[in-house]
Amino acid sequence: MSGHGAPVPMTSRKCAMLKGVANVPGDKSISHRSLILGALSVGETRILGLLEGEDVIDTAKAMRAFGAEVEDLGGGEWRVHGVGVGGFAEPSQVIDCGNSGTGVRLIMGTMATSPITATFTGDASLCSRPMGRVTDPLALFGARAYGRTGGRLPMTIVGAKDPVPVTYTVPVPSAQVKSAVLLAGLNAPGKTVVIEKEATRDHTERMLAGFGAEIVVENTPEGRVITLTGQPELKPQDIVVPRDPSSAAFPVCAAIITEGSDVLVPNIGLNPTRAGLFTTLREMGADLSYENLREEGGEPVADLRARYSPDLKGIAVPPERAASMIDEYPVLSVVASFAEGKTEMRGVKELRVKESDRIDAMAMGLRAAGVTVDEGEDWWIVEGRGFGNVPGGVTVESRLDHRIAMSFLVMGMATEKPMTVDDASPIATSFPIFEGLMASLGSAITRGNR
């Protein structure tokens, strides 16, 4: 049962080709951060192209609960009138973050160094996910956390009355943990230092600098060292949100495996800490090209053209690339099913604690569809069957995970028999226009069982 209401089964059938322009939604990571940093600024921030999925809308509601004025002006344009760093008010109600691990962890960090108390909850999937990876470093600032066994939601955070700056080495590659610590450091005096041994997506660092924070990033022998000077006055911004590379992954991968396809995905953010999937697909032999390369709002942007690629080869994805494409491994494993040879994906333990155990969810679904998969704690290997040789014809579980649902619907566009997802309703959390957009390109996705 979905945390968003009654289950919505969807079935995807083999289609002739995909053609057209895929205008995917705004980047989810940047959308969350735009709302949060707008709420911490003094004055009015305008955001154009905000992703209006459930995850981001929940973050907008949370910023209102902490005292910021947040207004939807229509057409993807939003206005945020901030309360300044340290200006959060104590919310009168529980903060419901729905399905969003990014939203809840970033918001926890943002309020942890203010002398207020807030209680957080979410849907069944979010309440099963561990929060200790964030609450442990927040405790170093002086915040206290009280949650369910295993550090799970619902959870109450008691913000630090007299926060202290910290130096923290992130134990596993996680942009959410890094960002939570940096956001907490905004309201701590002195310098907060975050050290990451492997670089993760750097939207928080880029956006903090854009809002006027004093932040220095250095590459050192011990890793990437980020130093933030606390208690700045953040300046409001006009933000144009690039389109989400994680959402673009689905029409791009669908075009690559669907015969005769030619799809253009415009205005995609190509931040090097996010573009690992596209690099990997090209290494596999995908016909994927960048057009109109440019920079918008400090982020590299391009139009992506993806064409049917019948000569895909399996590769070993470098483990050090994992952080730049962690959310895209599920749909990559679908593409790997149609390649020749084995695709190895290692260093991906983080996938075990996403909205679902994504390694297990994909491995079980792929095996049911006739694909050989081997897996371990932090890796899995997909043995491709080549085009025309993937049977399909099964119903798979989405496990309340939007990316699992979309990945198997993409798979059904090229399998011999249809693929059904038991519940596609979680797709609305990140890609609310997925169904209509894919239909406009020529997909054969219908609601209901086969």
Image (cartoon, helix red, strand yellow):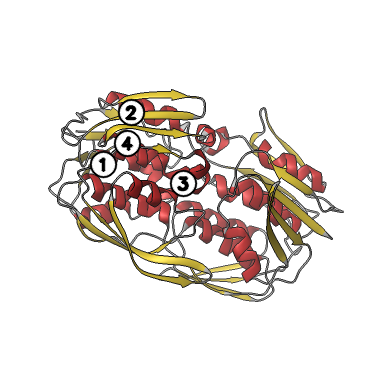
Mark 4 to mark 2 CA distance (whole Å)? 19 Å
Callout 4: helix, strand or loop? Answer: loop
Residue at 51 percent of width and 31 percent of height: 352
Mark 1 to mark 3 CA distance (whole Å)? 19 Å
Q: Which of marks 2 and 1 is nearer the N terminus?
A: 1
Mark 3 to mark 2 CA distance (whole Å)? 21 Å
Tell which tag, 1 or 3, sits nearer the viewer. Answer: 1
Q: Earlier in the sequence, mark 4 or mark 2?
A: 4
Residue that badge 4 annotates: 314
Residue that badge 1 annotates: 312
Residue at 48 percent of width and 53 percent of height: 274
Q: Say which mark, if any, is on residue 325.
A: 3
Residue that badge 2 annotates: 365
Callout 1: helix, strand or loop? Answer: loop
Tell me the crowding category of disc 4: few under 14, some 14 to 19, or many 20 or more residues within 10 angstroms, Cα based. Answer: many
Mark 3 to mark 4 CA distance (whole Å)? 17 Å
Three-letter residue code for mark 2: Gly
Q: Which of marks 1 and 3 is nearer the N terminus?
A: 1
Callout 2: helix, strand or loop? Answer: helix
The mark tally for this picture is: 4
